[in-house]
Image (spheres, coloured by chain):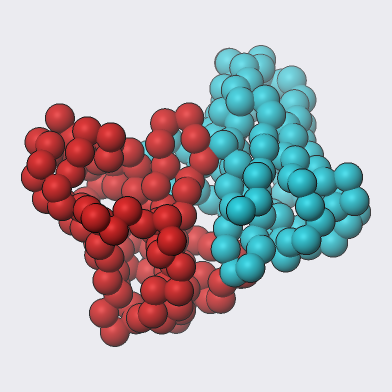
Chain colours: A red, B cyan
Amino acid sequence: EAGVVQSPRYKIIEKKQPVAFWCNPISGHNTLYWYLQNLGQGPELLIRYENEEAVDDSQLPKDRFSAERLKGVDSTLKIQPAELGDSAVYLCASSTTGDAEAFFGQGTRLTVV
Amino acid sequence: ILNVEQSPQSLHVQEGDSTNFTCSFPSSNFYALHWYRWETAKSPEALFVMTLNGDEKKKGRISATLNTKEGYSYLYIKGSQPEDSATYLCALTYGNQFYFGTGTSLTVIP
């Protein structure tokens, strides 16, 4: 069974530029998460989807971040415009339900210069 | 928001030494406690999921215990090997959400 797939693995952009990350969850997993992980800290939830509905986006900085999960499968996370402080690892995870074990992708390491 | 704390933040041990880390949390009101191992450039890998007070899980040289009454979980590694070097994350699930600790970074020195 294929795991959670994220792309790109690494991204370097200049500040004020847009960037997008893509996540393909495990087939059949209804719940999809985007996490932000800063160096030395644990992953912090940005947004959680149940199928195509964003059920928790309270921690998503909506002035510059947006996400979508069309058809309740793949998801994209976008930052526009990127700031230096956005440099971090962006993790995608999926699970069968909100409380079930989550499976993570390898993450996208973003560097904003 | 649940505050999940892990200690120590980082740890260096010699190959063959046994070691343990702590995950502490303020409340027993949660659905499950998860331990993940996150190796550099790889996906976080689930090690254990525990739900009941007194739960003990074991996988090879790694084991974990859960005490919900006092709000902590221990992860033990017996006879550490260089391949055990990773960040070990603890997370609670509560209200359909994961709450992660900051992780313990383990380095096993050959």
Residue B22's place in the image compared with B69, above or below, is: above
Residue A35 seen from this side: yes
Task: Compare residues A17 and B82 and report the one nearer the observer.
Answer: A17
- Find residue B50 and report its horizontal and vertical position in percent: 76, 58
Residue A112's place in the image compared with B13, above or below, is: below
Residue A14's place in the image compared with A71, above or below, is: above
Give left or right: position of A54 versus B68: left
- Find residue A75 and report its horizontal and vertical position in percent: 29, 69
Residue A93's place in the image compared with B64, above or below, is: below
Residue at image point 88% right, 45% down? B70
* Quadrant assignment for the N terminus of chain A: bottom left
* Quadrant assignment for the C terminus of chain A: top left
Residue B61 seen from this side: no
Residue at image point 32% right, 53% down? A61
Task: Compare residues A24 and A65 and report the one nearer the observer.
Answer: A65
Task: Compare residues A40 and A23 and report the one nearer the observer.
Answer: A40
Residue at image point 27% right, 65% down? A67
Give left or right: position of A13 versus A50: left
The quadrant where residue B104 appears: top right
The quadrant where residue A102 appears: bottom right
Residue at image point 26% right, 79% down? A70
Residue furthest to the bottom in view is: A71
